[in-house]
Image (cartoon, rainbow, N blue to C red):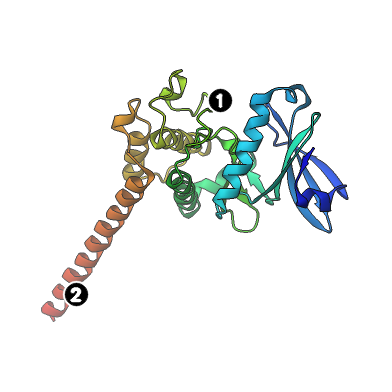
Amino acid sequence: MATSEFLKETEPFEQIESLPCGGSTSLCYRVRKDGKDYFMKKLRPEFRDNQRYRMLFHKELEIGKNLRNKYFANYLSLHENKDDIYLIMDFINGQCLEETLKVNPGYFTLAHNYEKFFIQLLKGLRILHSKNIAYLDLKPENILLTQVNNDVKIIDLGFCLDDTYGQTAGYNKDFAAPELFNNNGKDIDARSDIYSFGKLMLHINKICVIKHISLFRKKILNKCTQENPEDRFSSVDEILRYINRRKQILAFTVFSMIISIAGFFFGFY
């Protein structure tokens, strides 16, 4: 049995609560020890003999522990024996994007909420890409909005592609870039996540019937979701620079108008 020091100290847990956020290969729980909640991700029993899925848990822990960033969960440890394998991480009190779109679609109709989500998700992806990691599984179930401040948290790193783990186990067909459907995987890179980002934002636009989307934002999402990777933004940094340049131009335009109006006013009098 491979058990971390953390788990030696915390098992047995005082409380275990099943959560509805588990995927097709995993089960999720809120567990409590010494008054603090933790998140447990456990491989489903039918996959416990599948070495590929067990490897994904090891990969997720290694990638997660190397991130240590506000846009991701804080990974603590992995526990494994012949019958079981599960991850322990800090619990994030929040709601996944999928649930938010169902119960509170009006949240994104407020322009500042939409903008905050838009930028934070891009910055989270930028952190991954800076560490040579492609996420490849961007979908509403894998994004949390925290309860206190509605900050973005990207979860479930098992399907990531990085330098040391050169395989991905899957993707969501509704948001995956076209190149992920090719078996060779040679064209998969940061632009694949940029495509998924664009598809996800378009999904939000459709579900929430957002009317405040500017032509500028539509242009960004259109470029993100081009079929050919060469026609997309080359990086998240390029998208953010593009947005910042637009803000600078608008600020300069407003400033020029103020100066012109002031000049006319004082000149007139």
Circles 1 and 2 in contact, beta carbons < 8 Å:
no
Percent x, y of residue 269: 13, 81
Q: Quadrant of residue 69?
A: bottom right
Which residue is rendered at x = 27% and y = 59% of the image?
248
Against 4, residue 49 (above or below) is above
Percent x, y of residue 122: 44, 46
Question: Is residue 265 left or right of 44 when viewed as pictured?
Answer: left
- First in sequence: mark 1 vs mark 2: 1
Disc 1 marks which residue? 170
Q: What element carries label 1?
A: loop
Instruction: Work out which quarter of the rendered image holds the N terminus and state it.
Output: top right
| Type of amino acid at the residue the image marks with label 2 | Ala
| Type of amino acid at the residue the image marks with label 1 | Gly
Mark 1 crowdedness (10 Å alpha carbons): few <14, some 14-19, many ≥20: some
Q: Please, which residue is most extreme toward the front here?
A: 1
Q: Is mark 2 on a helix, strand or loop?
A: helix
Which residue is rendered at x = 46% and y = 38% of the image?
201
User: Who is closer to the viewer here, 166 or 111?
Assistant: 166
Against 35, residue 265 (above or below) is below
Question: Is residue 101 left or right of 131 when viewed as pictured?
Answer: right
Dot label at residue 262: 2
Distance, label 1 to label 2, CA atoms, is 59 Å
Against 170, residue 153 (above or below) is below
Can residue 72 be seen in the rendering of this structure?
no
